[in-house]
Image: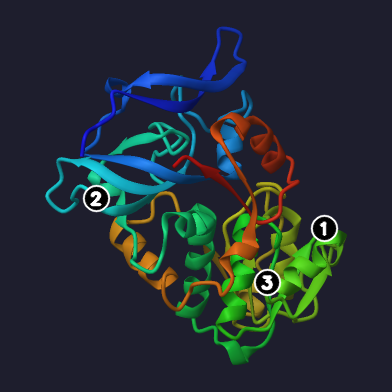
Amino acid sequence: MTLPNKYTAFVATKDDSGAVQLGTETRESEALPAGEVTVRVEWSSVNYKDALACRADGRVARISPLVPGVDLAGSVIASDDPDTGEGDRVVVHGYDLGVAHDGGFAELARVPAAWVVPLPESLTARDAMIIGTAGFTAALSVLALEDRGLGAADGPVLVTGATGGVGSTAVAMLAGRGYEVVASTGKDTEHEYLRALGAAGVVGRDEIAPESTRPLEREQWAGAVDCVGGAALQNVLRSLRYGAAVAASGNTGGVELNTSVFPFILRGVALLGIDSVQCPIDVRRSVWVRIAADLRPRDLERIVASEVTLAELPGALDAVHAGAVRGRTLVRLA
């Protein structure tokens, strides 16, 4: 394939005052960063981390100018890697993508071969970005709980922050695997959406994180996927059943965790940290095979909130940062 001379990219640039300027620009292909694999990007998505990378106070972007976008899917148009050929369909996310290495908000991306995941045949590039970083994190969470012994017959599984990208996909994945899923949200208008994804019940945010000084609460959950952190995670730990676990990946509710040792030493519960950024590439590739098969939500389209172009990204980034979006926002580049 012929590498285009120019491509369009959405760029975040920190100016001398410290403010971040956002906009699209046309770049020469020589501006692509180092890497063995060049991808014609078809789809990307808008993640909370992308919103932080585009803010002066976000403390995520490590270079300027930066093309944000922590995930992308498309076709290889040039490769110096013997295991990756022209025309291969791939997905890339995590590592330094969209943080210290130009990411998915561009028509072209060049990445290290060690970051590339072959796209399973049953997934389109659009499917891959409906799942994206958020869905991959949800898949890691479900697998971590099951590796510790959780089964569908064990009882209700709680998902906090259930209308977000990770939460929505976790609800759909768990429901598809036969679990009784209870979704937690602070958005009263989204109960129908969560039930449509497969939630057997929906509870308010206040029910998950009430004001309490008790070290333990009534045992409720056979397992949990926490996408919030803070007070929500604190209360989940206090209300897990004996021997249960929570897979935690979020911090939108705060980074502090004020808990005691009692859930761990009196109920034997476990806190499982979920990291999708530095996840080893062999694990990453095997999980995508599972996502395309037994972990695939039944109705991916239901998770899509909207599609935007590069020019429409500023508004989409603001909405994601404000928590005003349910499910996934896709970025259309093809």
The way the protein has been coloured in the rendering is rainbow
Q: Which residue is mark 1?
A: 186
Q: CA distance from mark 3 to mark 1?
A: 17 Å
Q: Amino acid at mark 2?
A: Gly
Instruction: Specify the quadrant that holds the N terminus.
Output: top left
Question: At which x and y percent is residue 100?
Answer: 41, 31
Q: Amino acid at mark 1?
A: Gly
Q: CA distance from mark 1 to mark 2?
A: 44 Å
Q: Amino acid at mark 3?
A: Leu
Q: Secondary structure at mark 3?
A: helix
Residue in the image at 60% along x and 59% along y: 166
Q: Which residue is mark 2?
A: 87
- Mark 1 is surrounded, within 10 Å at the Cα level, by few (under 14), some (14 to 19) or many (20 or more) other residues, namely some
Query: Quadrant of the rendered structure where residue 271 is?
Result: bottom right
Query: What number is the disc on residue 197?
Result: 3
Earlier-in-chain disc, 3 versus 2: 2
The residue lying furthest to the left in this view is: 82
- From the image, state whether disc 1 or disc 2 is nearer to you: 2
